Image: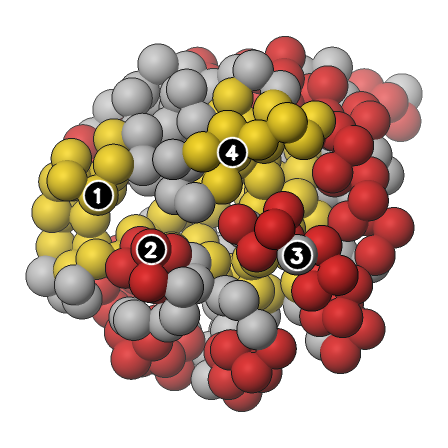
């Protein structure tokens, strides 16, 4: 399982929000490019970037910072979310060196956009689904919809998205532990991989996700825990790798 460090961008700075509230932010660095390098040096094999201003504005706002990170670390796959509402934005990010674009709110509001994006940019589109009690939330989590998260994930799977980033918004940024049951349930309900997000606190959560009753959680995004030091990123990735090896060994034996 990949441990994926989150770099959330607000006004050009690296921040973390509590439960998606823009006014409840903690600034961790004024130099997001340096932060990206720190996580790559610690063994990060993918980066998760979020344009928080873009998510609320509906168009990229921190694009320059994202391009700078992509050009500094060309060998590290980067997935970007926040403010991706049209094909032109996806094309611009991919040209800038981004590997995957995450469609969030727009996927729920305009599912046809996901189908079009998958056709235009195969193998580069991820859908981010934020859910509370199994129901999808949109607009920076301000609005909980009547859409069931499993039903929506299946629809996007059929469209050709490469994976689903699943965030339990009751847990994100709160360091309360991920919702492993809900994540495993989604992972077992679809055939494309799931990336877990929200609530990871410490190394025990990494172990629990690796041992969840599914083999379809390909990664876990971690933010506040690695910035506040409740999780050592390098140790977490090493543990995930060793558990993957031992679980594979058990299956082979």
Give the vertical position of 30 relative to 8 (above or below): below
Find out whether the residues at labels 1 and 2 contact each other: C-beta distance under 8 Å: yes
Give the vertical position of 253 relative to 39 (above or below): above
Where residue 56 is drawn, which disc sits there? 2
Q: Which residue is mark 3?
A: 110
Whichever of labels 1 and 3 marks the residue nearer the N terminus, that label is 1
Q: Is residue 95 shown left or right of residue 232? A: right
Find out whether the residues at labels 1 and 3 contact each other: C-beta distance under 8 Å: no
Q: Which residue is mark 1?
A: 22
Give the vertical position of 139 relative to 177 (above or below): below
Quadrant including the N terminus: top right
What crowding class fits label 1: few (fewer than 14 Cα within 10 Å), some (14-19), or many (20 or more)?
some
Whichever of labels 1 and 2 marks the residue nearer the N terminus, that label is 1
Task: Measure the C-alpha gap from mark 1 to mark 3.
Answer: 24 Å
Whichever of labels 4 and 2 marks the residue nearer the N terminus, that label is 2
Q: Which residue is mark 4?
A: 137
Residue that appears at 61% across and 77% down:
87
Whichever of labels 2 and 3 marks the residue nearer the N terminus, that label is 2
Q: Is residue 61 shown left or right of residue 235? A: left
Q: Secondary structure at mark 4?
A: strand
Q: Is residue 55 visible?
A: yes
């Amino acid at each position: 399982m990949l441990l994926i460090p989150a770099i959330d961008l607000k006004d050009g700075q690296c921040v973390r929000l509590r439960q998606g509230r823009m006014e409840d932010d903690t600034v961790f660095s004024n130099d997001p490019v340096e932060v990206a390098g720190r996580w790559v040096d610690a063994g990060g094999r993918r980066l998760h970037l979020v344009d928080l201003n873009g998510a609320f504005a509906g168009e990229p706002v921190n694009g320059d910072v994202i391009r700078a990170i992509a050009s500094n670390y060309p060998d590290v796959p980067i997935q970007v979310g926040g403010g991706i509402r049209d094909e032109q934005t996806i094309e611009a990010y991919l040209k800038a060196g981004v590997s995957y674009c995450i469609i969030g709110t727009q996927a729920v509001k305009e599912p046809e956009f996901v189908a079009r994006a998958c056709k235009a940019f195969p193998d580069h589109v991820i859908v981010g689904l934020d859910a509370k009690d199994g129901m999808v939330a949109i607009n920076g989590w301000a609005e909980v919809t009547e859409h069931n998260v499993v039903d929506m994930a299946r629809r996007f799977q059929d469209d050709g998205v490469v994976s689903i980033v699943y965030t339990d918004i009751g847990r994100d940024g709160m360091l309360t532990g991920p919702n492993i049951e809900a994540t495993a349930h989604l992972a077992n309900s679809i055939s494309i991989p799931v990336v877990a997000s929200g609530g990871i606190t410490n190394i025990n959560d990494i172990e629990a996700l690796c041992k969840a009753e599914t083999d379809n959680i390909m990664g876990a995004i971690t933010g506040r825990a690695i910035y506040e030091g409740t999780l050592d990123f390098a140790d977490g990735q090493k543990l995930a790798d060793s558990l993957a090896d031992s679980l594979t060994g058990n299956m082979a034996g």
